[in-house]
Amino acid sequence: MTQRREHDFLGEREIPKDVYYGIQTLRAIENFHITGIPLKVEPLFVQALGYVKKAAAMANAELGALKKEIADSIIKASDRVISGEFNNQFITDLIQGGAGTSVNMNANEVIANIALEMQGKEKGDYQYCHPNNHVNCSQSTNDAYPTAFRIALINKLSLYKESLRALGDAFEAKGEEFNQVLKMGRTQLQDAVPMSMGDEFRAFATTIREELTRIEESKKLIAEVNMGATAIGTGVNAPEGYAELVVRHLRTVTGLDLVLATDLIEATNDTGAYVQLSGVLKRTAIKVSKICNDLRLLSSGPRCGINEINLPPMQPGSSIMPGKVNPVIPEVVNQTAFYVIGADLTLTLAAEAGQLQLNVMEPVIAFSLFTSITYMTNACNTLREKCVTGITANAERTRDMVMQSIGIVTQLNPIIGYEKSAAIAREALETGKSVHDIAVKEKKLVTQEKWDEIFTFENMIRPKFINS
């Protein structure tokens, strides 16, 4: 393979002639064998780096910091990166030392070499378009990397919101389908009072939809960028007015409502927005996992469990037990949630570990958020498509369990009082008799007519006060 030679202040290296990255990216490939997950796996991040470099070139040309012809070539090269044409050239590991410098230089080198090729020059002939002097003009990794990171996060969150919204809608649809299914509600795994299975599934929908608001709140914090801060927030090496102008161009090229941080020194070292977003992801993961726990319990059996609902059979459940089918979809979503909960701790420690004017741990923060959002998006889609939409109810069984339950005695409290109700419950538990037979036939504490009034379907799921 033909090679080209490039240099940095550490020395010279040979690089395959056909690649668009350069010597600093090569060093990163050699140094960081951590996750095995390259930058190209996050195409929205690659796209966001293109947006940042394009907006910077536009601002630099307008302020006279770059010659127009060089800026134009960077803008055109950035557009090709934004389109995804060169995703395979973004190969640095997502977790790396250097606060993201390798990612930033990967972008600088690729865009510089695309620009050179478009000018008819050889890759690596950086006198005509230099990764640092031109593509990185008026920037530092410390503002370019987090700004691109935030743009990518906002776009990933939009996709995640759609998966959450669709999952909530699926539970809502099941709520309507199961509206007339009577079942026993439970607290502390014990029989409580009757309810509609439709209400149970609508509650799942409500708790998921609440997260859409929390995500929007987090997106507003993420939309505050430090572009123009350069190294530590003082704006060193950037022309006057650059910060405001570059953010204005960023808003235009991304279509996002980005805002410039009011204190660029604070914004360069603060990672509080990431902590809050991670907390929202953890909160949602916990809620979805709790729902999956409920689905596993409610579908347990089929003969020796609760068996109120049936989950779609997705695969044989045992290599030794014939006919066994496991709740594999809720199980995999549970495990995904565990990962997100753990990633939140990783991010928390990384946010706390930043010292002085920069948090150098931002790559692992990026990795934690990117993977958590991706995994939760996939988990929500999987849960909806392969589980929720195919759930069926065992309505006859659930009604029989209600009428045989001791928990229905609660609805006699206003008529016969707590003490007599408790005595009926105890006797029913000890003898196996039904609450109905003890209260109506044996003790004659309520009439059959009153019983029928109390225990209509509507009154059991939407109880109204009935006295003697």
Image (cartoon, grey):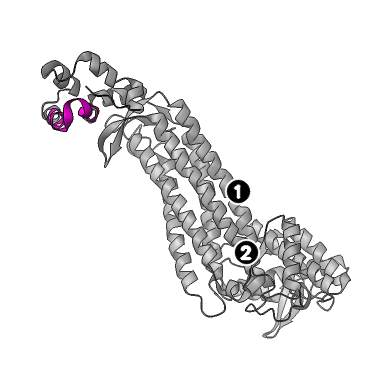
In the image: residue 276, left or right of residue 262: left
Is 414 contained in the magenta span? yes
Figure check: 381 above or below 247: above
Q: Position of residue 361 (x, y in %)?
A: 53, 72
- Residue 247, image x, y percentages: 72, 65
Q: Where does the magenta region start and end?
A: 410-426
Tell whether 66 sits left or right of 237.
Answer: right
Q: Which mark is residue 224?
A: 2
- Judged left or right of residue 406, residue 386 is right
Can the viewer see residue 121 in this picture? no
Q: Quadrant of the C terminus?
A: top left
Residue type at numbered disc 2: Glu
**x and y, in percent, of residue 253 in the image:** 75, 58
Comparing labels 1 and 2, the label whose residue is closer to the camera = 2
Task: Pinpoint residue 45: horizontal percent, then vertical percent.
Answer: 64, 60
Q: Which of 124 and 43 is in front in this view?
A: 43
Image quarter where the N terminus lies is bottom right
Element assignment for label 1: helix
Q: Which of 73 and 245 is in front in this view?
A: 245
Label 2 sits on a secondary structure element that is strand
Residue found at x 71% / y 74%: 139
At 11% across and 19% down in the image, what residue appears?
Answer: 443
Identify the mark at residue 159; answer none if there is no mark. Answer: 1
- Majority SS type along the magenta span: helix
